Image (spheres, rainbow, N blue to C red):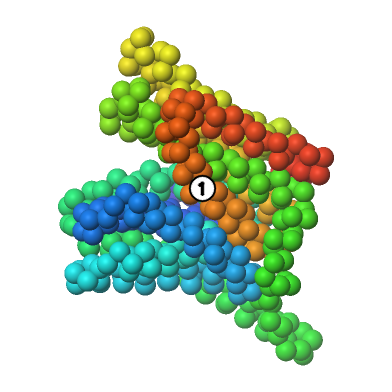
Amino acid sequence: MNGFSDVVGRSRAWLARVFISRPFSRVLAGQVVSVTGSNATAVVVPLIAVITLNASSFEVGVLNAAESLAAAVLGIHIGRWCDRIGPDRTMLVSNLTGAVATIGLFAVLHAGVLSFPLLLALLLVVGLAELGFDISRTGYTVSLVPRERLPHANALIEGANAIGEGIGPSVGGWLFDAVGAALSLLFDFVTYVCSSLLVLLNVLERRKRKTVASEHTSRRDGSAPAETDGDGDGDVLSGLRFVWGNGIIRSIAFSAGQFNFFTAAFFTIYYVFVVRVLHMDPVAVGLAATCSGIGGIVSSVAAGTLIRRMASDPLFIATLLAPALAALLVPLSALTIGYGNAVVITLVCVSQFVWSFTVTVNLVLSESIKQVTTPERLLGQVSSVERVIALAAEPIGALAGGLFADMIGEDIALYLCAVGLAVSTAWALGEHGILSFCKPDEWQR
């Protein structure tokens, strides 16, 4: 009996060490559920547009840019709202907003009255909901996780993203084929509801703790309980001024913006190149995508250790340079076509694995640095500014990639993308940039 109790005790201790706390484990579970649903819908919506609405390629592109447009127009305002009402409530409101928009899309599609403008409007609402959820998660993680565990917590979140991104598209495609367009949307609605319930448990638990603490304070000094919720800080441009004025955050934000620009350009060309030039069939393309997903999951396990053991500035620069080198493998693999398809596929798979592994480490490191550098009252606004910069760069990069590929050829355009990815490290090389960041002592434990 004692042996069994020891095993249970050790298991609980291990779970507490890995998943940090019960509230954070709920956030993590909600992240897996939410990302899975969002990626399932990301497959379903273009199929609805093409099959049901007979949309053109341009119209599908407009739908894919809906989230970026939402971020560019209202992202900063969402960040300030997050700082004003609190990250947990923002996550809850964002989830419920996404659920309402999704069930609305299901209703109009089931009723046969869906139009392209209505689809676009609902996707803009969904984009805002996803943006609010992502922005608020940064501040919420800080409020739930000890400072020394932030890199580990962010690595777990990136692992949750990798799992959801790997599962979601397959689920979306299967549901669309099995139950049809309208009913396949209910899966995303259910994931929104599940994620909302997980966040709601945390909100209620926090309110209960705050009520108990207020009662103890009132009994001790006879004063009325003070309201502790944040009220934001300054005007709507406070986050933008902080990003511009803080060299560390500015270097992260603008290197990410340039990196996302050339990433979007690269993958716009990538699928055309691997199919038409490298003659990879759908199975081989899917295998490369699987290697990318595996790279992200492996990286989420290793990122915390790498951040703890390596200096932050060389690790940040290395994780921007490594994807550029990985990108070079794709056009270079054309030189090995004479050696057989196996060699070509292996090089592309290695490229995707290395890309995903190093990008995930960079995301975890960047998020952790932002969380310890930015005042907690501004985390929502700073996160929203970063998202605006990153997401605004993606549609522009995608258009530029397609244009340059048509003008100078896919292979040369891919080489240029690799150079652009590598040059994104220039933002981090200034003396006031990431090179000036001092890693907290507790990260090295």
Residue 241: x %, y % from top left: 74, 61
- Residue 63, quarter of picture: bottom left
Judging by the rendered image, the residue that carries numbered circle 1 is 396
Q: Nearer the viewer, residue 379 or 198?
A: 379
Figure check: 79 above or below 409: below
Q: Is residue 206 toward the left or the right of residue 266 in the image?
A: right
Quadrant where the C terminus lies? Answer: top right
Figure check: 276 above or below 362: above
Please name the residue shown 48% across and 35% down the image: 404
Can residue 416 be seen here? The reply is yes
Residue 398: x %, y % from top left: 47, 43
Can residue 143 be seen here? The reply is no
Q: Nearer the viewer, residue 373 or 304?
A: 373
Q: Is residue 412 toward the left or the right of residue 212 in the image?
A: left
Residue 133: x %, y % from top left: 51, 62
- Residue 137, quarter of picture: bottom right
Disc 1 is placed on an element classified as helix
Q: How many marks?
A: 1
